Amino acid sequence: MAEKLKNMFFTRESMGVFADALTAAYSDFDSNAFLNLVFDEKWETLELKERMRHTTQALYETLPDEFHQAIAILKKIAPKVKGFEAMTLHDYIELYGMQDWQTSLSAIRYFNQFASGEFAIRPFIESYPDTVFPFLLSCAEDEDERIRRFAGEGCRPRLPWAMALPALKRDPAPILPILEKLKDDPSEFVRKSVANNLNDISKDHPDLVLELCERWKGYSPRTDWIIKHACRTLLKAGDKRAMLLFGFGNPDNLHIRSLACEKQSLSIGEKQLFTFTLKVYGKKNCKIRLEYSVCYIKSNGKSSKKIFQISENSYEPGEYVFKRKQTFEDMSTRKHFPGEHSIAIIVNGEEKAKCSFQLTSKDTG
């Protein structure tokens, strides 16, 4: 079994390195007091993010009270702190730096050379948007790709595991100048963040994202990659405008025949083989996005659909046979439950055929 992430970081060894770096940077630092505060009686019960916050609070108890002085010390140790431990530096700013935004923003930018600060910037976006967005715009022009990436990542409206920013969900306009600056960035690391930000926005403002993507299309191969990745949710949803943007034509001349599931009943843990034939009518080749969906039964008896991509390709008129396997083995990301499941074939955003089968409890005999 893989080791739990929380046990890989904030270990006694790594925190010892942390404490030694602090002692070297600040001669009055009481490393024993710090480590005793960190590894207290509740430490073993804490999850990874809780351990980070707990460590931040221990820092606050052992660093100078004056925020500017504490940040100066943390800046000295930043190059020596790695992994999740380094995110504690950003967390310190998030917890204790809201009243000194000038020092905080400068420190966040500096710390981004060593650990990403997209979580720490979000309270500042909420409280000081007129100050923070010009700051992020300047970060988008930085020579360091890690700081440019932070500019696009920190303002994502739906950043996973992060503080919500409802104002940006309602109106993402302040984000767009930042993404404009990054739309042809040479770093794939940055471009992925731009695409993820746009994908977030598309969930609340699909037309705005499609208008932007239509304007950006053809600007450069790097920009074209961004807009394709940005529209992934719209494409999975079969949005007609998104389909047309990427050249996927009208599905009326595309048909699915002979969809068949190998088993009418299978147990949790088994695989389902399914086959089908794609029939392309007409006289010209056609660009086709071919997907299949699985309709799963959840623990409450309701259904949930998950879409999987098969291919994106151009096909000449004719017939094409496909065979695929879908596993129904339990994983950390998905648990399976008994009941009627189905597999459907989707062509250019339109469901064309479906087959159903029973999933039963795992045979323990």
Image (cartoon, helix red, strand yellow):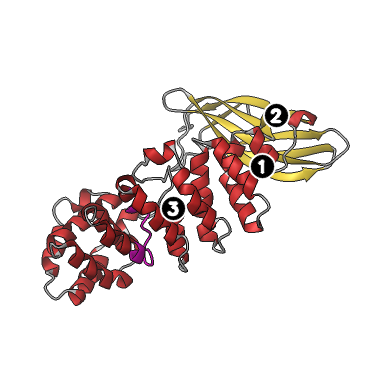
Measured Cα–Cα span from mark 2 to mark 1:
16 Å
Q: Quadrant of residue 6?
A: bottom left
Q: Are marks 2 and 1 in contact (CB under 8 Å)?
A: no
In this rendering, position of residue 129 left or right of residue 23: right
Question: For numbered disc 1, what is the local secondary structure?
Answer: strand
Q: Residue furthest front?
A: 130
Given this view, does label 1 or label 3 mark the residue nearer the observer?
Answer: 3
Relative vertical location of residue 149 with respect to residue 30 in this rendering, above or below: above
What residue did someone put label 3 on? 153
Tell me the chief SS of the magenta region. Answer: loop
Q: Which residue corresponds to the image point at 15% horizontal and 65% vertical from the top-left?
A: 63
Question: Which of the two labelled residues, at mark 3 and mark 2, occupies the earlier sequence position?
Answer: 3
Question: For numbered disc 2, what is the local secondary structure?
Answer: strand
- In the rendering, at what x and y percent does residue 293 appear? 60, 33
What residue did someone put label 1 on? 310
Q: Which residue corresponds to the image point at 29% horizontal and 51% vertical from the top-left?
A: 49
The kind of residue on which mark 2 rests is Ala
In this rendering, position of residue 316 left or right of residue 116: right
What residue did someone put label 2 on? 260
Q: Bounds of the magenta span?
A: 109-122
